Amino acid sequence: MDFLSFLLVLLSIAWICPFLISNSKQRKSGKLPPGPYPFPIIGNILELGQKPHQSLAKLSKTYGPLMYLKIGYLETVVVSSPEIAKDILQKYDQVFSSRSVPSALISVGHHKLSMVWLPMENQWRKLRRICKEQMFTLQKLDASWDLRQEKLQKLFEYVSQCCVNSQAVNIGEAAFITSLNLISATLFSVDFAEFNSDSSQEFKDVVWGVMECVGSPNFADYFPLLKYFDPQGISCRTKFYFEKIFAIFDGIIDERLQSRGTSMKNDLLEALLDLNQKQEPEISRDDIKHLMLDLFVAGSDTTSAIVEWAMAELLQNPKKILKVRKELRDAVGINGLIQELDISRLPYLQAVVKETFRLHPAFPFLVPHKANADVEINGYVVPKNAQILVNVWASGRDSDTWSSPYSFMPERFLDHKTDLRGQDFELIPFGAGRRICLGLPLAHRMVHLMLATLICNFEWKLEEGSKREEVDMSDKFGLTLQKAIPLKAFPVKL
């Protein structure tokens, strides 16, 4: 039975059995946040559409920034304003610290081992501490600068070769390969992909497959009985992608264990194996694999997506790309590679990155939170066990917060010192509170560095006959937000 047929069956039952409205008692209390009235059985599932971030943003204009929906049997509260996001992620952070875990991840047991989905208990704290100490402290990041410089140099050389060959660059793919190799070199001391290779596209397909499976609406999440039937095949596809990635990780781990007596690497895997090989291991092999998966998915796909969106916006705004290039050349000169210390001296580049995160957040919804208890917010009760969706895509287009919210205007951030690090709730692409993304410092550096590399020494032209204002800006929905049509452009050496 396909998706549409299944919906029609549910609707038929709903109209025949109107007494099956499950939340009428709660509605009568008037305590729940406002929202569209649910159909029997299926609730508000039809409201989601193909692009839930857009559908729910539109609904919030009618029902407000704190909105209640019944999606099948899953109670969901959607947050669409910075003020209420601050209540959820800061004021009541402890109450909303749990995760609403997709059934696709439950089917492969990832929620039991993943730092992203674990409850904030001892195992979560241990994994977060290990990651921070071994990878994300300022000292560790500064010490690994030469590694990032090497990957940026390879990106520069690839784009230069495309200039010589008059070859178009797939911006998202080039950024993905750069991010992927940075992560793989940091974790395993190897590059996973080469430019113009099938291996990079294969790994990107696997990473995006995981993101799509976890982020796409899944009937098994909304109707508990369907978890056993997997009507859309999402759990099956998730298992396939996980097995493919874990097979790669197992091969690398086995090879490293065999060579440890003769050679030692200075990477995260070596540090994790040290912890694993203790008489009383601090971390298991499964812990290592699931942690590596989290780091790969979060580090490669999200960073490359933002770089591609930023370039797409700049190609439509030639005056703005000229302004960025001038700022970069004043800072690093012609044919220079930007240093990380230069980022703080590049206010317009920083503004471009912030404006891109505002319009095209890597995660249109933050990773779903879950209420551990009933909480009253703005006079309404957010019920215990409800899934909390913070729609940062909607917040970025809120006319009450932003002037000309649909226009790409980096200048808006030159006068306002809005920060990306979870303190200014009108711009929280990495989340906020205890669950803020641990990899934020690395992602922040890489986005600025890759953009600078692409812009400083190259002019970019679209295919002949294409107009800048006609660059396709549609997106496709998953856990992350991708461009529906990849951005391709021809570089010209300056």
Image (cartoon, grey):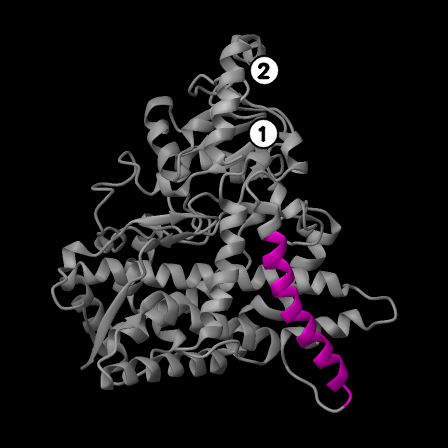
Secondary structure, mark 1, is loop
Residue furthest toward the front? 1
Residue 478 lies, in percent from the top left, at: 45, 48
Residue 207 lies, in percent from the top left, at: 51, 60
Question: Looking at the rendered structure, which numbered label has been put on residue 441?
Answer: none
Q: In percent of the image, x 43 and y 62: which residue is there?
A: 303
Question: Which residue does the numbered mark 2 point to in the structure image?
Answer: 22
286 and 251: which one is in front?
251
493 and 234: which one is in front?
234
Tell me the amino acid under the disc marked 2. Answer: Ser
How many labels were placed on the picture?
2
Q: In percent of the image, x 50 and y 39: which residue is there?
A: 217
Question: Looking at the rendered structure, which numbered label has been put on residue 386?
Answer: 1
Check if residue 175 falls in the magenta segment. Answer: no
Q: Is residue 372 visible?
A: no
470 and 311: which one is in front?
470
Residue 41 lies, in percent from the top left, at: 55, 19
Check if residue 242 falls in the magenta segment. Answer: yes
Tell me the amino acid under the disc marked 1. Answer: Ala
The magenta stretch is 238-261
